[in-house]
Image (tube, rainbow, N blue to C red):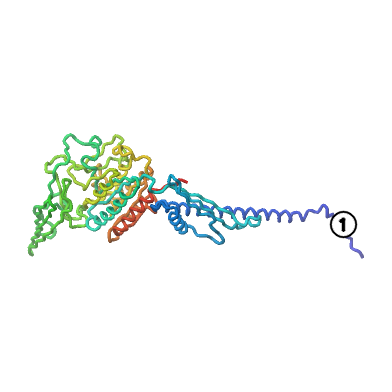
Amino acid sequence: MFTKIKKRNFVSDESGNVAIMFAVSLMAMLAASGLALDVTDMHNRKSTLQSASDAAVLAAAVSDETNIQRLKKIAETAFESNFVLEADESIKEFDLNLSEDEELSLNVQLEKPTLMMGIAGFDAVDVKVQSATLLANSTPLDIAFVLDRTGSMAGQNMSGLINASRELITDLDASERDIRIAVIPFSDYVNVGANGIALSLLDFPATATSGSDVMCTMADASSSGCTSGTSSGGTSGTTTTTSGSCTTTGGGTCTVVTTTSSTSGSSTTTMTWTDVSTSSTGAFCTISSDPQESSGSLIEECTPVVPTENWFGCVGSREAPYNLTAGFEGQKFPPVYDRTCGEPMVPLTDDLITARVSIDDLTASGSTYIPAGLQWGWRALDPSVPFDSQQTSDRNKLLILMTDGQNTRSQDGILHTGFDFNAADVLTADLCESIKRNDIQIATVSYSNGGSGAANTAMLESCASSKGLFYEARNAISLRRAFESAINQANNIRLTR
């Protein structure tokens, strides 16, 4: 028997076309996926290359070098520390140029192998980036040094600050940089100087006077009374008698004698306090780390000779929302009467030696209220009233906040006598953000000469304009380096291309 064979029409049979179309589509999909992978990879590498190029040109620009070969070496070192070549990659171009107007430009070209595009005959692609900026010396810069001068800065903290500042400012003065400096010492208040700003900007009553002589007596920081007298406390039958004397001229000393009597006997303690400031703005004697904290320590209390509304330059805070603004805006600044608060601030000046001497003369006293320093540091850099004559426009601006502690006072009305530390921290953070929004770079320094420090580092890190502008300094050398690094970064912080 024969099996009947069915005739097949091969011409009209389309069953194989599906497989062919699938194979073609699969190849197209693979090619598209490969292209997408290559594009993504190139984008990522270009981003990394751009960042490394930016870092390289900035490192060269702030180096104070002007020789193109040395500039290129600095740029190469910085580039290599920020960019690692992957397998089979190579740098085809690294071209650094310095124009006549002191613009430093860098062109970098990377050759990198493709992942899938080799199928189409593209085994490698070139990735190109360009960065440009001005040499640091060519950019005018205004700096406000907002410096903690509270009681905890007494001793080696203050001497370290003075030494670091002296060397730094001396070097800046010898350089050819167009730099102006303001110095804003702060504790619980800032001293704007008895003649520092126009009296019309201050909320003075008609009875006020300024610059009167002061007399100083020893006082207990935990009470409002003077130390002379008799008090009872502690164990029943115990009486403590304290007497004090102070000399405020000629670098004198303050001697306090405390006699404690009880049924079990009597003891006498004598303390000698070194006079660290003897001027018309007041004298502060201290043997403790922070003489004006409410720790029960005896402090020197300075009051006007004539008991009336005397003003020695200390200024409180305007009520919200004006405590978050720099300009005058028709809202007068409130004087703090019958109170001394250290050396007066120095508005922006191109006489850097004058600025340096003002830091040389700093003393330590008072509690910590960081917003006061930030407010007046901001005003020193702001082009409006009260320092509108300074012409700060078209200049880079840097505020350097240095502190060894954290807020121990808060705003209470116009005074800084409160103890809501959280409110003070919130206001500090808000001020930092407001200042940065006004095109002012902020560098922050947590400082303690030889110790771990007590600064609120989290708040200082957040306040700084970038992670690279927050510093921890544990001696005078590292403090100077922090100041110098911040100045170099801020003097050339913006890329032109």
Q: Is residue 104 left or right of residue 265?
A: right
Q: Is residue 71 above or below residue 346?
A: below
Q: Nearer the viewer, residue 142 or 231?
A: 142
Q: Nearer the viewer, residue 24 or 134?
A: 134
Q: Give residue 279's position: percent from left, percent from top.
A: 16, 48
Farthest residue, direction right: 1
Assign the N terminus to one quadrant of the image.
bottom right
Q: Is residue 150 left or right of residue 136?
A: left
Asked whether the viewer can see residue 114, the reply is yes
Q: Amino acid at mark 1?
A: Lys
Name the residue: 47% across, 59% down.
80
Total number of numbered discs in the rendering: 1
Q: Give residue 185's position: percent from left, percent from top.
A: 26, 48
Helix, strand or loop at label 1? It is loop
- Please tell me in which quadrant of the rendered image residue 88 appears: bottom right
Q: Give residue 496's position: percent from left, percent from top.
A: 45, 45
Q: Give residue 242's position: percent from left, percent from top.
A: 10, 55
- Please tell me in which quadrant of the rendered image residue 413 appears: top left
Mark 1 highlights which residue? 7
